[in-house]
Image (cartoon, rainbow, N blue to C red):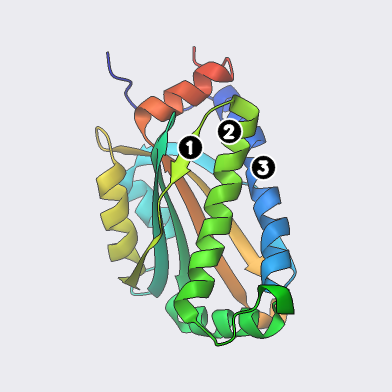
Amino acid sequence: MAATLQQLTPVQQDALKEVFNIGSGQSATTLAEVTGLKVMVSVPAIGVKPVDEVLDSLAKPGLPVVSLVNIFAGDVSGATIWLMPGDKAREFAQHCWHHMPQAKKSAEFNFGQIHREVSEVLTTAYLTAVEDLLSLMTVPSTPLMLSGVMKNILGKILAERTESGLVAYVQNRFTFGEKALGFSGFFMMMPDAGSLHTMLRILKVDD
């Protein structure tokens, strides 16, 4: 029988949080090296909720964003998404480019390349944590860049990942540089129902 999504117990949330705390910490360290900026990351929020409820809690009405979507497959499958407010995305990319270590810096500024690199660092760090701690193999795809109103972009992506009206997600907020810079973005990982069940089973909290 195919696995179905259902609400997570506190024990299940804590078990998953341990895995993704490692992923978010690794990604913050790598992003600091890549961008040349101090990177702070929130404790991951984990849940299984109706799409509308996730949108209401995360999406700001009318806010334009730049996003990158990465579909991953393997022993577990799903998608990740990196979101940054559109009015800050280009300024953030330019700031990163100017502050990158010379060895990591391209000859010319490339907005899309910098955001793709951020997305790839985040996705790789999270999936590596899953691979190392749960002994699972994953294969990420090339990120797809989308731009538009946050609620529309996020709603479309969540709708594609929903099962029985619910979506499983891990969400972190990343803040770059000092507070005065005001650069922040959201990263979400959305495993499908079968993959979530696989992770819970390996963590021995699937009952």
- Count residues near mark 1 (Cα–Cα under 10 Å), then give few for <14, some for 14-19, many for 20+: some
- Neighbourhood count class around disc 2 (C-alpha, 10 Å): few under 14, some 14–19, many 20 upward: some
> How far is mark 3 from mark 1, CA to CA?
18 Å
Q: Is residue 42 visible?
A: no
Compare residues 188 and 146 and report the one nearer the observer: 146
The one nearer the camera, 140 or 122, is: 140
Total marks placed = 3
Within the image, what quadrant is residue 57 found in? bottom left
Identify the element where label 2 is drawn.
Answer: helix
Query: Pointer 3 and pointer 1: residues touching (CB < 8 Å)?
Result: no
Q: Is residue 198 above or below residue 78?
A: above
Which residue, given by chain and number where applicable, does mark 1 sit on? 138
Of the numbered discs 3 and 2, the one sitting upstream in the chain is 3
Q: Is residue 92 left or right of residue 50?
A: right
Where is residue 195 shown, x and y percent of the image? 42, 29
Residue type for callout 2: Glu
At 53% from the left and 73% from the top, the residue drawn is 114
Q: CA distance from mark 2 to mark 1?
A: 7 Å
* Residue 24 badge: none
From the top left corner, tell me how far across and down residue 202 is, in percent: 55, 18
In the image, what residue occupies the spot 54% across and 86% down?
A: 109
Where does label 3 land, which residue?
A: 21
Element at badge 1? strand
Q: Identify the residue at horizontal 39%, vertical 57% (top origin).
A: 69
Q: Are marks 2 and 1 in contact (CB under 8 Å)?
A: yes
Which sits earlier in the primary sequence, circle 2 or circle 1?
Answer: 2
Q: Describe residue 22's horizontal placement relative to residue 47 as left or right.
A: right
Q: Amino acid at mark 1?
A: Thr
Which labelled disc corresponds to residue 131?
2
Mark 3: give few (<14), some (14-19) or many (20+) Cα within 10 Å: some
